[in-house]
Amino acid sequence: MKKLGILGSTGSIGTQTLEIVRHNQDLKVSALAAGSNVLKMEEQIREFKPRLAVMWTKEAAQELAIKVADTDTKILWGMEGLLEIAVMEEMEVLVTAIVGMIGIRPTIAAIRAGKTIALANKETLVTAGHIIMPLAAEKKVSILPVDSEHSAIFQSMHGENRERVSKILLTASGGPFRGRKREELTEIRVEDALKHPNWSMGRKITVDSATLVNKGLEVIEAKWLFGVEPEKIQVVVHPQSIIHSMVEYADGGIMAQLGMPDMKLPIQYALFYPDRRPMEGKRVDFFELSSITFERPDTDTFKGLAFAYEALRAGGSMPTVFNAANEKAVSLFLDRKIRFLEIYDLIQGAMEAHKTVADPSVEEILEAEAAAYEYIESHRRY
Ligand code: NAD
Ligand code: MG
């Protein structure tokens, strides 16, 4: 029996993780955490009977506690609650499916407590990879990627000598606006940005896919997960999203992982690694597919990727500013307070205004986050 904690259980990755739990009798849920969706959390508590459930706000937790008073589940709230899940005695694998760098502290606490991490929450690695990866090595804790590209890279490195990796080929769908130029992006509405061609995901990451910020975050995530320098990570646009990423080796050989665009595969792979459990679902039909294509990313139009490489070059606290400015800008865009292209302006402005702090501590990361938020507040035109 493997016991899971799921941070972000009501979201896209969280609910798909629970779907896998439903199909595998040897998985059990010890703890769940979510932001504010009390109704969904109540359903999940009744079905999965976790020992502990956490809501982000006190009000949501109080409302939930009344609803589930007849169950044995203990209810907590806020960061304290997330940290309590992270170190829970019986929990063995923490699935980090929360959005944003709020995941940093619980992830660090779980690693300190020796828990395996199934990591979906890329923002945490982007901002605190320099703390998390050495800590995981010291504690001999595995960080298993859930992000589809990183799972593909991980699978393509299985049994290989990592010193012989010459290049990581990170694939990208190109998002809903692939092929458009800047002048064609001025009128983009929230609904347009939320229509991803291949993947059904949470709102924030869907917008990030449209700006290519998501691919930028993934380049940084790959650098930390696989210890590969940014020059060796190449983004390849592959609109069909069948090849989930590839690794080229010193002899020119390339290993790739392919499959339908369905997050359940990488989630399940992380939960049972190195086993491959059976899974229902549509299979790739190469005759139906008939062709797969590749393009160079247009980083002049979709600047998210260019900013990420810049942030990586600057290092230290700059990836935090890139990420935090994006988190704030995307939330303003989703609230219809700024235009699509202003996301880029706010990220660029916040990065230009920031003086990089080398090797930042968690406190300094949170300070850099606050500074990026302040920059955006003080430059508001909305
Ligand atoms: P989502 O918006 O669908 O779900 C987010 C979950 O986190 C929800 O359960 C929400 O209630 C919870 N949450 C948000 N703020 C919280 C807080 N302060 N405290 C506790 N819970 C909180 O997001 P998602 O698409 O599932 O993405 C989750 C993470 O996984 C992100 O980092 C994303 O980049 C990454 N990811 C997602 C996908 C995907 O297919 N959805 C693919 C790869 C990576
Ligand atoms: Mg991805």
Image (cartoon, helix red, strand yellow):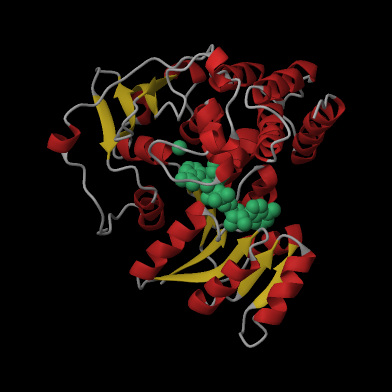
Residue found at the very far left of the displayed protein: 287
> Residue 19, percent across and down?
40, 63
Does residue 351 show up?
yes
| Residue lying at 17% horizontally and 41% vertically, measured from the top left | 285
- Of residues 350 and 191, the one drawn nearer to the viewer in this rendering: 191
- Of residues 262 and 51, the one drawn nearer to the viewer in this rendering: 262
Image mark count: 0
Residue found at the very far right of the displayed protein: 378
Q: Is residue 44 above or below residue 265?
A: below
Quarter of the picture containing the N terminus is bottom left
131 sits to left or right of 224: right
| Residue lying at 50% horizontally and 53% vertically, measured from the top left | 12
| Residue lying at 74% horizontally and 40% vertically, measured from the top left | 362
Quarter of the picture containing the C terminus is top right
105 sits to left or right of 154: right
Which picture quadrant has residue 305?
top right
